[in-house]
Image (cartoon, helix red, strand yellow):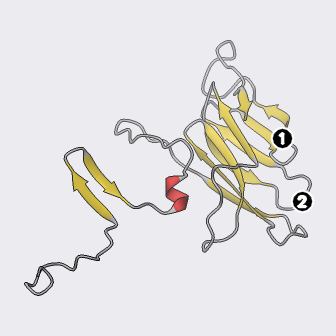
Amino acid sequence: MAAEGGGKEMNEIKTQFTTREGLYKLLPHSEYSRPNRVPFNSQGSNPVRVSFVNLNDQSGNGDRLCFNVGRELYFYIYKGVRKAADLSKPIDKRIYKGTQPTCHDFNHLTATAESVSLLVGFSAGQVQLIDPIKKETSKLFNEEGLLSPPSQASPPGATVV
C-alpha cells in the first residue's frame, strides 16, 4: 500500500497542480470573478486606485467601493473583508475611450443612500463629477486638458454599462 510505504496520502486535496499546458490553481471567488483581467504589461503600468464611502443606509450595507482598472471605473457595495463583493454585478461601470482615470474620491459630506458625488481625474487633465448611484454625469471640468493643446483635447467619453 502506498500509505504504508511513506508516500503521500491518497485523499489529499490539491489547491494547485502543474501540467504541460501550465499551472492550475484554486482561486477564491473574489479573484476568480474579477472583472476584465488586465494582462501584465512590463512597459507601462495601469495604477489601480480605490475609494470608499459610507452612505449610512437602512439595509446595513452602507459602505461603497470604487476602483479603476485601466480605462474602466467600477462602483460596488462593499460588505467588508470577510465577505467578498459580487464583482459580476457592479452598481455602476464606466469605460472611458479618450483618457484613463488616474484618481477619484467621494464627497463624504454630501453622500446619501440616494446620491453620492464622485470626482474623477483623468490622465489628460480633465476632471469629471459623476453620481454612480443615479448613473448621471454632472460636470466635466478642464475640458481642454492640461497636457494637450485645446484643439487636440477630447472629453473622456464614458460608456456606462
Q: Residue at x 11, y 87 (%)?
A: 4
Q: Are marks 1 and 2 in contact (CB under 8 Å)?
A: no
Q: Which amino acid does the dot numbered 2 rest on?
A: Ala
* N-term-proximal mark, 1 vs 2: 2
Q: Which amino acid does the dot numbered 1 rest on?
A: Lys
Most distant residue in the front direction: 1
Crowd tier of the residue under label 1, counting other residues whose Cα lies within 10 Å: few below 14, some 14–19, many 20 or above: some
Numbered badge on residue 31: none
In the image: residue 134, left or right of residue 74: right
Q: Which residue is mark 1?
A: 135
Separation (CA) of disc 1 from disc 2: 13 Å
- Tag 1's secondary structure? loop
Nearer to me, 44 or 34: 34
Query: Where residue 139 sits in the image (x, y, percent)?
Result: 85, 34
Query: Where residue 158 sits in the image (x, y, percent)?
Result: 72, 30
Query: Where residue 9 sits in the image (x, y, percent)?
Result: 21, 80
Locate the N terminus by quadrant.
bottom left
Q: Which residue is mark 2?
A: 113
Q: Residue at x 72, y 53 (%)?
A: 105
Most distant residue in the bottom direction: 4
Q: Residue at x 23, y 76 (%)?
A: 10
Picture quadrant of residue 55: bottom right
Nearer to me, 126 or 21: 21
| As drawn, 160 above or below 87 | above
Crowd tier of the residue under label 2, counting other residues whose Cα lies within 10 Å: few below 14, some 14–19, many 20 or above: some
